[in-house]
């Protein structure tokens, strides 16, 4: 999981290989309420906290792997769509079980 103060780069296996994605610190601040000037460790903690939601958005944005690094934008995560709300409820049910 490469990262620096500017964001997180991660790979996801999708059709035809691995696709790299970039989630900037600004997106983490805007979409996931990362505190300004938060540490790199906090940045990664937030990334893992919202990993399922991030992966769902990433794989929806790119269905077939390419050689580029695809940046994710804050608009990719808001407003919550009906599908996101359903998935969030489902995750909560799984956690309660």
Image: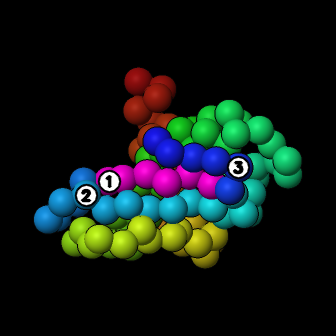
Disc 3 crowd, CA 10 A, few/some/many (<14, 14-19, 20+): few
Q: Which residue is mark 2?
A: 18
Please say whether residue 18 is visible from this viewpoint: yes
| Residue 55: x %, y % from top left | 41, 54
The answer to whether residue 50 is above or below residue 93 is: below
Disc 3 secondary structure class? loop
Quarter location, residue 28: bottom right
Give the spatial CA distance, label 3 vs label 1. 21 Å
Going from the N terminus, do you reach mark 3 or mark 1 first?
Answer: 3
Q: Which mark is residue 90?
A: none
Disc 1 crowd, CA 10 A, few/some/many (<14, 14-19, 20+): some
The answer to whether residue 93 is above or below residue 2 is: above
Q: Which residue is mark 3?
A: 5
| Residue 95: x %, y % from top left | 46, 29
Please say whether residue 56 is visible from this viewpoint: no
Q: Which mark is residue 12?
A: 1
Going from the N terminus, do you reach mark 2 or mark 3 first?
Answer: 3
Closer to the observer: label 3 or label 1? 3
Going from the N terminus, do you reach mark 1 or mark 2 first?
Answer: 1
Give the spatial CA distance, label 1 vs label 2. 5 Å
Residue drawn 68% across the image and 56% down it: 6
Please report contact status of discs 1 and 2: CB closer than 8 Å, yes or no.
Answer: yes
Residue drawn 57% across the image and 46% down it: 3
Magenta segment, principal secondary structure?
strand
User: Magenta residues, as a range?
Assistant: 7-12
How has the structure been colored for display? rainbow
| Towards the viewer: 23 or 92 | 23
Residue drawn 63% across the image and 70% down it: 74
66 vs 47, left or right, is left
Disc 1 secondary structure class? strand
The answer to whether residue 68 is above or below residue 55 is: below
Disc 2 secondary structure class? strand
């Amino acid at each position: 999981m490469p990262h620096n103060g500017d964001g997180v780069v991660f790979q996801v296996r999708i059709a035809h290989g691995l696709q790299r994605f970039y989630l900037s610190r600004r997106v983490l601040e805007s979409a996931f309420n990362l505190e300004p000037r938060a540490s790199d460790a906090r940045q990664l903690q937030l990334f893992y906290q919202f990993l399922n939601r991030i992966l769902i958005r990433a794989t929806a944005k790119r269905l077939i792997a390419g050689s580029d690094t695809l940046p994710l934008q804050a608009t990719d995560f808001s407003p919550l769509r009906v599908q996101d709300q359903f998935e969030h409820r489902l995750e909560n049910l799984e956690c309660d079980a």
